[in-house]
Amino acid sequence: MRRLPALVAALLLPAAQPLLLGTALSTASLLVSEAPAQAQSQEAVGKVAQAITVRLETSGAGGSGVLVKRDGNRYTVLTAWHVVSGQRAGEELDIYTSDGQRRLMEQGSIKRLGEVDLAVLTFSSPTAYEVARVGDVKSVAMGSAILVAGFPLASSSVPTRLLRLIKGDVIANATVAIPDGYQLLYDNQTLPGVSGGAVLNAKGELVGIHGKAEKADQVSESSGKAVATGTNQGVPISYYKQYAAGEAVVASTTQATSADDYLAQARALLVKMGREQEVIKLANQVLAIRQSAEAYFYRAYAKLNLGDKQAAIADYSQAIAINPKDATAYYNRGVAKSALGDMQSAIADYTQAIAINPKLAAAYNNRGGAKSALGDKQGAIADCDQAIAINPQYADAYYNRGVAKSALGDKQAAIADYSQAININPQNAKAFNNRGNAKSALGDKQGAIADLNQAIAINPQNAKAFSNRGAVKFELGDKKGAIVDYSKAITLAPAEGMFYANRAEAYFLLSFKKEACADFVKAQKLGFVVKEVYYPSSKNGAWCRQ
């Protein structure tokens, strides 16, 4: 009557380029140049980025910003609106400049630019700082080199916020209006905290402000796994130019006409549930104009969400054919294959994703899940270990390692992993469920009940948690309480034969033979193998047949 919950595998949105860790710049020298703009070395652009990029410590998580104007001792910082939108009147906002000095924002100076994800704020300082050379966003196009500068949030591996310059390529530069102004798409692998930072062209000119980084936490409805886009989004500098000129801050057009426009529209809809058909239509419009790995990728992403796994695999394969270095496309194709039960092929794709990007924690996590499904529990644990080494806050990796350890009989170690997953994400209903099962196996029935209660409180639609709580109540002798929980599980998942079999056994032991017989027969019809002692068609089942 015990059941081990399946491993949870995360999906990612594809990354067009392998992960490139930015270079921390530690020198404090300023670059002042009046020479005509021309392509510069990455080191030279790095010096520009260091001079103009500031670290913002807000009432929220914090972010980055760019010095764009100097008026006497007053400086204007351009950043992303979402970085400062939570700032309340009277709250301090600290601005750390290139010399490491702390400057206080002038109260009341935060102003959003139109309806896009841009804001300006000001501070005063007698120190002379370089300001950004504002460029033309039209200077970059699909395939152009682009660099993003900002200060990632502190982590266990890098406990201080250091400036990073992260290189990549432009995916699309749209002119059509996109929600929040996210018309500039690129594959630079940014980190939390870089929002509001500088997006620079090869000349070191400011062509945009970094907005949203892609996240590997969008869950596909059909696969139940997290998927990643591999696309980051920025707001073009043209909106700031409008503001600085006293013009209305608006997009140049609301009518999409180019492949870049259609791509940007598709990306804006990509993680919105229920908009999959629109994404597919937009991707088709891109492909009618040009071949695009991103268009195939976005279309595959939408198809996977709609449950068409084979079509998603075909489109991911097309994306990979165009860009064989796209770790995220391999990763997401592995997710689709895993959802079809083809674990060996999924493992091959996850392995290829890891070869391209050895820091892709989700690929280790999912490969571990596939290995576990094939019975390789030790291999699963090793992969989860690696995922955790890369990202110590990866709740799913702790959860999946706990599942593998539990399957090997190490319930105490499994409980420790489930507890860590819960510490990271207190709303992790699956971890509470599994920890409850492990506690029950060790004889801690009351602890198990408490965990299963919590799993149900977090997710009242969790049929397995009701069934598992029923099983613990059954073992504690509370057969009537068990029947109540099994009945709830059946209401939530009427096609699960095990739930009927469990309730039937409780009915049988309470001498409700008619109800027990009906449940045993139903369990059999649903393909669940009933214990021989209760099997209605065996010699021991005469009580039911009669």
Image (cartoon, grey):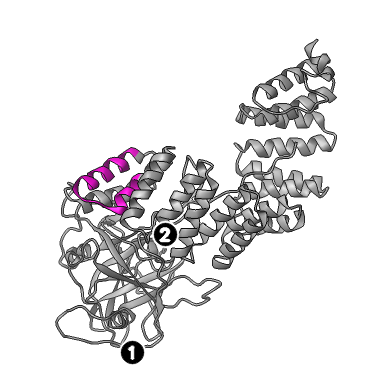
Q: Residue at x 77, y 31 (%)?
A: 481
Tell me the quadrant of the picture where the N terminus can be found: top right
Which quadrant of the figure has residue 208? bottom left
- Give the secondary structure at mark 2: helix
Give the residues drawn in magenta, as a range.
277-299
Q: Residue at x 15, y 61 (%)?
A: 247
Instruction: Indicate yes or no whether the magenta region holds residue 293.
Output: yes
- Give the secondary structure at mark 1: loop
Tell me the quadrant of the picture where the C terminus can be found: top right
**Which mark is on residue 543?**
none
| Residue type indicated by callout 1 | Ser
Residue highlighted by disc 1: 29
* Residue 268 appears in the figure: no
Residue highlighted by disc 2: 327
Question: From the viewer's perspective, is 333 left or right of 31?
Answer: right
Q: Nearer the viewer, residue 250 or 529?
A: 529
| Residue type indicated by callout 2 | Ala
Question: From the viewer's perspective, is 129 left or right of 340?
Answer: left
